[in-house]
Amino acid sequence: MAICSMRFQRPWLLYILHLYILVNKNGAITPDGEALLSFRSAIVSSDGILPLWRPEDADPCNWRGVTCDQKTKRVIYLSLKNHKLSGPISPDLGKLEHLRVLALYNNNFYGTIPSELGNCTELQEIFLQGNYLSGPIPSELGNLTVLQNLDISSNSLSGSIPSSLGKLNKLITFNVSNNFLIGPIPSDGVLINFADNSFTGNRDLCGKQINRTCRDDSGGSGTDGQPPSGQNQGGKKKYSGRLLISTSATIGALLLVALMCFWGCFLYKKFGKNESNSIAMDVSGGASIVMFHGDLPYSSKDIIKKLETLTEEHVIGSGGFGTVYKLEMDDGSIFALKRIVKMDDGFDRFFERELEILGSIKHRYLVNLRGYCNSPTSKLLIYDFLSGGSLDEALHERSEQLDWDARLTVIMGAAKGLAYLHHDCSPRIIHRDIKSSNILLDGNLEARVTDFGLAKLLGDGESHITTIVAGTFGYLAPEYMQSGRATEKTDVYSFGVLVLEVLSGKRPTDASFIEKGLNIVGWLNFLITENRPREIVDPNCEGVQVESLDALLSVAIQCVSSSPEDRPTMHRVVQVLESEVMTPCPSDFYDTNSD
């Protein structure tokens, strides 16, 4: 009997020994590496980035998405946005004691936000927006005394906003919009400084910040920012249905995880949380097709029939407002379909009005909106499909680099598209989310501006100001982040950041900038003080011309001026690009590899 037992155990002993040798091949991995491996083990699926994290490495500093302090080898930056990561966020991230930036936005994370993140007391930035996180906001986040930016919007978070967050005195940006939060917004501390745009999309919040009085069950007003007497009991009655749904969803998620552990990823893909059946479900409840100017030469029946066949395999992108699918008709014509989930009761009225205007806009440097499908649960916008993908992909995800002429062509197209929105549309449009992923390229690398879902449409007689905050961190003008007031000049700033991104080949919040406490604009200003601004150019860019480069740098410097009054209009930007950037002396080249 003992011999049989030894025979049974020996393979397990060999397996453990093999793992030990593997992990210690180049020395034991660092504690930060162990924490990240634990994070990886909780991930169910991704786009293939995490298998490159190897446990046999001495440290995680060369892993994709990870940045370490060069001297201590401690992890200071974890950036894995837009990688289709699905699974819970491991609480072991709380062991990354020197983590400064955590960027996991626009993925498919579910489960709760780990309270252990409160142990990462050096955290300055947390970006978890655009996931499926549920449960309460951990009160332990109030321990992060140096936190400057917290964005956990567009999730499924519930419960109240912890009063401990009011102690985060260094907080500059704060966004919990589009969740299921309830109760009073704390008015003690720093949270009183944030406007209603930080809290929109949470129907049952109340407080001074959103100009909504907190009331108890009897209709009486509660103390500002504090729960009125008896509110806990009333809240239980009022939200019992929601809590039951939330509890059911949590149990379902746990059962799902158990099934995945037993059956593997196959059952996850089949039954897990994805949007494979979302389109079919949208149109099955009744849908209508609206076409603009005969741009869609198909019957409504044919289009809906095609929509019913779309699955997650047809997904080609995602953003803060929706998922984008590739829609191919029987005649071979291809379109991009953007699915936008309805947010509230006013959704239909707002988007019907907006889409009527957008459908009438036709311009060479704007992505054409062909029509849309109206369903009870979503809007399905049908755009032209551009085979070149996004500028973000061309700059940061492809091995083939854009040469100088291609980069200038892209900048010129983006400038003309934005200038049309600012000056020639009626009503004029402020985009408010100019970034490389919102610039699409055709087969000839000609640029088109897309995604006006965030745009505030301005009437000719109205003030050219809107206070609805949108946009992407790194591209936002400083006055916009402080006040939430967007003008054409805030778009100009974002365009200037885009130019620097195209010139450098680096994202606005590249890890190399974060290490120095800078962004791409700060880096440019540093190079200017050192009298070497040309060093911002991507060394892999071929064919750079000095005169053209200097003129383009001059434009970018003006666009990212800290003073909105000093920024040019987009009409002026186009004029300078045409006269000084696109027609330089052809023989004057700049070697990006020279000293």
Image: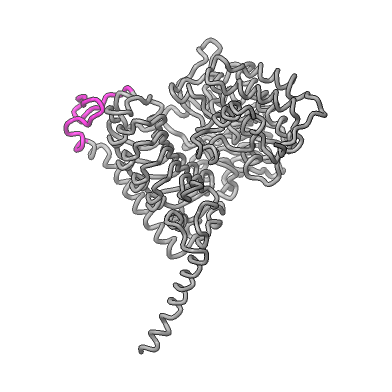
Residue 451, quarter of picture = top right
Q: Give the position of the N terminus as an image quadrant.
A: bottom left
Residue 114 visible from this viewpoint: yes
In the displayed image of the protein, which residue is found farthest to the left? 229
Describe residue 41's horizontal placement relative to residue 425 as left or right: left
Identify the residue at the far right of this view: 587
For the C terminus, the image quarter is top right
Along the line of sight, the residue nearer the viewer: 520 or 371: 520
User: In the rendered structure, which segment of residues is drawn in magenta?
Assistant: 211-234
Q: Main secondary structure of the magenta part?
A: loop
**As displayed, is residue 60 above or below residue 542?**
below
Q: Tell me how the rendering is colored.
A: one colour
Give coordinates of residue 201: x percent, y percent.
40, 32
Q: Is residue 125 magenta?
A: no
In this view, the residue in front, 306 or 544, is 544
Residue 287 in picture, x, y percent from top left: 53, 37
Name the residue nearer the viewer: 420 or 530. 530
Count of labels in the image: 0
Q: Residue furthest top?
A: 461
In screen coordinates, is 90 left or right of 330?
left
Q: Position of residue 531 (x, y in %)?
A: 63, 27
Residue 228 belongs to magenta span? yes
Residue under the point 67% across and 23% down: 416
Q: Is residue 271 among what the camera can see? A: no
Q: Is residue 373 above or below residue 493?
A: below
Residue 326 point in image, percent of width and height = 62, 43
Q: Image point 65% across, 33% down: which residue?
A: 535
